[in-house]
Amino acid sequence: MVVVVWLAIGALAAGQRGYFGSEPANCAGAATVVVTVLAGPLNYLGVNPKVTCPTVPQPSS
């Protein structure tokens, strides 16, 4: 029950930040939404998780 409440509070925080308004444009956007939900109530204590994804090398031509 505690985990469900924790994740619900995180989802509320992500919704208030507007993360569910549109589809994430890239890996970093999607990962930021997930980390925000997992942070739960910590979002209201000043935690503002942001995630950056590594650049994938392109094949040589």
Image (cartoon, helix red, strand yellow):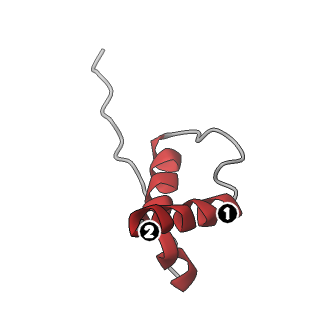
- Quickly name the residue at label 2: 39
Looking at the picture, does residue 23 appear above or below residue 50? above
- Quickly name the residue at label 1: 17
Q: Quadrant of the C terminus?
A: top left
Residue 18 percent coordinates (x, y) = 70, 56
Secondary structure state at the residue bearing disc 2: helix
Q: Could you classify mark 1 by the number of other residues whose Cα lies within 10 Å: few (under 14), some (14-19), or many (20 or more)?
A: few
Q: Identify which residue, 31 or 26, lies in the foreground.
A: 31
Residue 49 in view of the camera: no
| Extreme residue toward the front, this view | 1
Q: Which residue is found at the position 30% from the left and 33% from the top?
A: 57
Q: Identify which residue, 58 or 20, lies in the foreground.
A: 20
Q: Which residue is found at the position 47% from the left and 78% from the top?
A: 42
N-term-proximal mark, 1 vs 2: 1
Residue 29 in view of the camera: yes
Q: What's the amino acid at mark 2?
A: Ala
Q: Which residue is found at the position 58% from the left and 41% from the top?
A: 24
Spatial CA distance of label 1 from label 2 is 14 Å
Residue 7 percent coordinates (x, y) = 48, 62
Q: Identify which residue, 42 or 29, lies in the foreground.
A: 42
Q: What's the amino acid at mark 1?
A: Arg
Residue 5 percent coordinates (x, y) = 49, 67
